[in-house]
Structures are given as C-alpha cells and as structure tokens.
C-alpha cells in the first residue's frame, strides 16, 4: 500500500478518502472506494465501504452511451479495493508494514442487478482466511439494500 504504516482510526469509525488513499495506491479514475463506513478486526475482520456512482464516471460514455451501466469487472474491482483496505488495516493493527495487495483470483462472481448513475454501492467484505501474505475474502455489494453482486477474492501482498 504505502511505504509507511498509516495512522489508524479506531475500529468502527469511518475512514474518509484521504486516509483511504494512505491505505491503497489507487487514484482517480481508478479509486473505487469513497468511504469506509465501519470496520472491525474482532471477532471477525469485516469492513463496510461505499462507492458513489455518478453520471460523470469515465467508463459511462462507452458502457453504454444511451443506457449507462457500471461494468461488472469494476464492481468486482471496487470490492477488491475494499478488501485491500481491510488487509491494510489488519496489517497496520499488527504493527506490520503494509504491503501492496494484488488481486490473484476471483471465484463465484455473481451479478443480480445493474448498477447505474445515482446508485450508492455498499460493499461488505469479510476476511475468510489469512495464510502468510495472502488473504481470502467474501464480498457482497448492494444498492438500496438489495444485493447486486457477490464474489470470493484471493489477494496477495508483495
């Protein structure tokens, strides 16, 4: 993520965009996490984050011009970035240097509804397992309380 261990908010507290930028390396136009609403490390490592989907997103002119829809791969990427934030928080809480996390594998990706301008994508991420420098995450994204996507991710830190 970054070269130094970030200053952390307390569990359960919101994390705003400037602190998110200290946890993951993504920047506009590819930063897809606008805010962390809540997170915890005990009893389970979980995080809830949002992406506000606006009409001026750079992908909408081509996907699709007359019917803008957020691409499924970007919904998965947004969930992966939320998982990266959770991984960075977890590492920082253990006093470890925060590595750069890479998406290694996507399993069981499902999409049940389109995401369009004006939607707020709410992403829930749970760390299922940690092995050495790899984390396995269960992810779900919802709009207005209705699930729009889900997947399992494997991320590796380097």
Image (tube, rainbow, N blue to C red):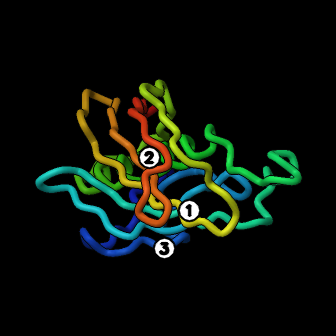
Residue 22 visible? The answer is no
Q: Which residue is mark 3?
A: 16
* CB under 8 Å between discs 3 and 1: no
**Residue beneath the point at 88% across and 51% down:** 65
Image quadrant in which you'd find residue 68: bottom right
Cα separation between marks 3 and 1: 12 Å
**Residue beneath the point at 27% across and 28% down:** 132
**Badge 1 element:** strand
First in sequence: mark 1 vs mark 2: 1
Cα separation between marks 2 and 3: 15 Å
For marks 1 and 2, give the one nearer the viewer: 1
With 22 as the anchor, is 44 left or right in this view? left
Q: Position of residue 31 (x, y in %)?
A: 63, 55
Crowdedness near tag 2: few (<14), some (14–19) or many (≥20) residues, C-alpha within 10 Å = many
With 53 as the anchor, is 42 left or right in this view? left
Cα separation between marks 1 and 2: 15 Å
Q: Position of residue 83 (x, y in %)?
A: 41, 46
Which numbered marker is on residue 51? 1
Q: Which residue is mark 2?
A: 84
With 135 as the anchor, is 63 left or right in this view? right
Q: Position of residue 57 (x, y in %)?
A: 76, 60
Is residue 128 depicted above or below 21 in this figure? above
**Badge 3 element:** loop
**Badge 2 element:** helix
């Amino acid at each position: 993520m970054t070269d130094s261990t970030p200053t952390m908010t307390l569990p359960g507290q919101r994390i705003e965009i400037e602190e998110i930028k200290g946890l993951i390396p993504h920047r506009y136009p590819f930063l897809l996490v606008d805010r962390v609403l809540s997170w915890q490390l005990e009893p389970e490592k979980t995080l809830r984050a949002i992406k506000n989907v606006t009409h001026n997103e750079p992908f909408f002119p081509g996907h699709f011009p007359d019917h803008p829809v957020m691409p499924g791969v970007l919904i998965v990427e947004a969930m992966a970035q939320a998982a990266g934030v959770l991984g960075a928080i977890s590492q920082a809480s253990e006093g470890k240097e925060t590595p750069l996390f890479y998406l290694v594998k996507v399993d069981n990706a499902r999409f049940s509804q389109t995401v369009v301008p004006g939607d707020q994508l709410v992403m829930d991420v749970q760390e299922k397992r940690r092995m050495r420098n790899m984390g396995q995450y269960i992810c779900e994204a919802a709009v207005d309380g209705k699930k729009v996507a889900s997947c399992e991710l494997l991320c590796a830190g380097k």
